[in-house]
Image (spheres, rainbow, N blue to C red):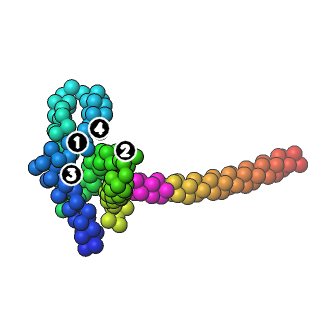
Amino acid sequence: MSLLRFVARSMLASYFVVNGVKALRHPEELVASAEPVADKVLPLVNSALPESARSYLPTDTTGYVKLNGALQVAGGLSLATGIGRRLGAGVLALTMVPHVLASNPLKAKGGERTVAQSQLGKNIALLGGVLLASQDTEGRPNLAWKVRTQKQLVAKEAARRKAELERDARATAADAAKLARKSVRKARRSVEGVLS
């Protein structure tokens, strides 16, 4: 891992760790802005999950804010330390979706609209950053590339082997035809020798 990657990931992760701790310690400050999103998202998630998983989800907006904060802390620490960094970045991307949805500048009036627009821009930039971090393989090929390359190598080897088999088959057919002509000539000489 390069020093630049480590520093950049740590800088990106610090935002999420700080805000996650803030959400865990003082969720009441974020409840008002999270309420519209939680009212729409929580029922959808609850209807999609089985009964056994629903008991682990929060039922109110305060619990939702705390859960989002805990996920941001865990994802941020994962991204910063490099332990499960791609999964951690994916979790951070998921936690940013409600923030992007909540920062709608169209609902704001006057001077608040400018603040809301900058908040939306920041949230989209952070979402893009963690999405990019979730795909970073540190210069090593990912699994999809390895599978695609292996498939190309197998196809190339199969084509080479097919061409080799076709060449051998043509050579065998030519040898068989030559042998057949030789046998026919020999048979004709034998027949001509008997007839003469």
Q: Nearer the viewer, residue 76 or 187?
A: 76
- Quick check: 59 above or below 166? above
Under mark 3, the amino acid is: Gln
Q: Secondary structure at mark 2?
A: helix
Which residue is disc 2 drawn over? 107
| Lateral position of residue 81 relative to residue 98, left or right | left
Q: CA distance from mark 3 to mark 4?
A: 20 Å
Which residue is disc 4 drawn over? 36
Assign the N terminus to one quadrant of the image.
bottom left
Under mark 1, the amino acid is: Ala
Residue 34, position as x, y percentages in the image: 25, 42
Residue 83, position as x, y percentages in the image: 20, 58
Q: Magenta region: which residues?
A: 143-153
Q: Seen from this angle, which residue lies furthest bottom?
A: 3
Residue 25, position as x, y percentages in the image: 10, 49
Of the residues under marks 1 and 3, which one precedes in the sequence?
1
Residue at image location 28% in from the left, 73% down from the top:
4
Asked if labels 4 and 2 touch by Cβ distance under 8 angstroms, the answer is no
Q: CA distance from mark 1 to mark 3?
A: 19 Å
Residue at image location 25% in from the left, 73% down from the top:
3
Which residue is disc 3 drawn over? 72
Q: Which mark is residue 48?
A: none
